[in-house]
Amino acid sequence: MTKEKFTDLVLESEKTLYRVSMSMLRNERDCEDAVQTAILTAYEKLSDLKHEEFFKTWLVRILINVCNKQLRYHNRHTELSEDIPYENSDTSREVRDAIEKLPEKIRQTVVL
């Protein structure tokens, strides 16, 4: 498949991709990231596509996998700012600063 053909097929699938990702992620920024990642992944794995007539289905499947991965990531990682209301309390600010100084692995455990 040529680059031009790939581009044409992606543009034909654009509305479907955004509709699928928005239905799963419900956030425009996450939706855009997922679509971009799916398109890049499809381009990199284009040699794996056996039948060009299934390109759109294949691309949507990649997108669904990307969205599921994002959802799993968001479920596992909680923003620290949501957990500790540091703006109203000096103690909370001190706790937040102390947690931010921890190594990444320990910080994730503390936040979870």
Image: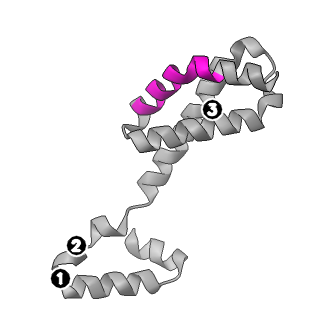
Q: Amino acid at mark 1?
A: Ser
Q: Quickly name the residue at label 1.
A: 89
Q: Which callout, 1 or 3, points at the residue further toward the start of the chain?
A: 3
Label 3 sits on a secondary structure element that is helix
Looking at the rendering, the stretch of residues picked out in magenta corresponds to: 10-22
Where on the picture, by quarter, is residue 11? top right
Q: Is residue 62 magenta?
A: no
Q: Which residue is nearer to you in this view: 103 or 39?
A: 39
Q: Residue at x 52, y 26 (%)?
A: 17
Q: Which residue is nearer to you in this view: 104 or 34?
A: 34
Residue 75 vs residue 64: left or right? left
Q: Quickly name the residue at label 3.
A: 62
Q: Amino acid at mark 2?
A: Pro
Q: Quickly name the residue at label 2.
A: 85
Question: Dot 3 surroundings within 10 Å: few (below 14), some, or many (20 or more)?
Answer: some
Q: What is the quadrant of the C terminus in the image? A: bottom left
Residue 73 vs residue 9: left or right? left
Q: Residue at x 67, y 38 (%)?
A: 40
Q: Amino acid at mark 3?
A: Ile
Q: Which callout, 2 or 3, points at the residue further toward the start of the chain?
A: 3
